[in-house]
Image (cartoon, rainbow, N blue to C red):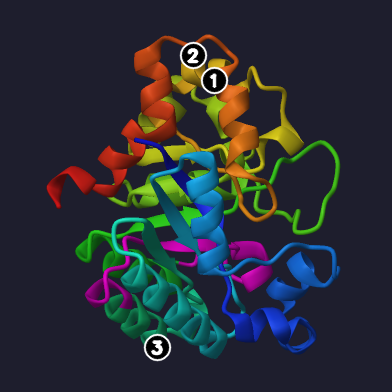
Amino acid sequence: MIIDFHTHIFSPKIISGRGHYVAADPVFACLYSNPKAKLGTAEELISEMDACGVDKSVVLNIGWSSHDLCVESNDYILESAAKYPGRLIPFIAIQPLAGQNAISEIERGARSGARGIGELRPDVQGVDLDETAIMSPFVESLVSNNLILLSHVDEPVGHTYPGKGKATPASFYSFIKDYPDLKLVLAHWGGGMPFYSLMPEVHRALKNVWFDSAASPLLYQPSVYRHVAELSGVDKILYGSDWPLLSPQRGLAEVRSLGLPENSLDKIIGGNAVSVLGLGND
């Protein structure tokens, strides 16, 4: 089974009204103010999945700054997952600063079949991960509803790109230690976090943390899969494309070209996702 753990879909309303949403929300603006930045619907994703042999995709929202825009865009993601059962796995957007409204939206998502929250953008959303008054009730709601948190993480070095911010591995470490029961996926290889798992205390702290490979061809050499498997363990890697930015085929071709053991390849492109998402329990 092939599972793409990192895709984004938007409603036709948002796509056709891009300019309105760019003006309305700074997170959407930093990602999609350039008219060339790709946006895609659920139907377009399904077509791409069929063309690339992808069985299931995690469909992520973005970290809208506005609670109301979280809710509006969550509606489309939840409706799309219901329209394509067994193909699309919904994650919803939450603005933790919305307080009780955020908790209510988490609970609505859980009731509606969401498997997680994401893609959180803590720096652009104005969220301090160390602010326990905000984050503790947020995380408690996720854990009690058995939801995964997927967050964008930035590399502290290297080239800039639209959406690159200040959510570096260092900003997540205390958060990870404070909430060991939270299932956490750090996107884009965790901004390099796997390297620090060579430190014994960091390795222990990352027990409930996974890394997706979203946009990997734009960031790293293909050998990153082999290195992270050695640093953190192959069980920690979740294949993700970042569609529609990149086609799933590009990243799948990269990881398949490495000559990894068949068991390791199967885990990376689907088996680990089945475990993390609890799909075997359905």
Residue at 22%, 66% in the rendered image: 145
Q: What amino acid is found at the position of numbered circle 3 in the picture?
A: Asn
Boundaries of the magenta span:
109-131
Horizontal and vertical percent position of residue 123: 66, 63
In the picture of the structure, the residue carrying the numbered disc 3 is: 101
In the picture of the structure, the residue carrying the numbered disc 2 is: 230
Residue at 54%, 45% in the rendered image: 51
Q: Tell me, yes or no, if residue 192 can be seen here.
A: no
In the picture of the structure, the residue carrying the numbered disc 1 is: 256
Front in this rendered view, residue 72 or 127: 72
Horizontal and vertical percent position of residue 230: 49, 13
Q: Secondary structure at mark 1?
A: helix
- Closest to the camera, between mark 1 and mark 2, is 1
Query: The N terminus appears in which quarter of the rendering?
Result: top left
Query: Based on the displayed image, in which of its 4 quarters is residue 163 positioned?
Result: bottom right
Horizontal and vertical percent position of residue 107: 27, 78
Q: What amino acid is found at the position of numbered circle 1 in the picture?
A: Arg
Say which label, 1 or 2, has the lower sequence index: 2
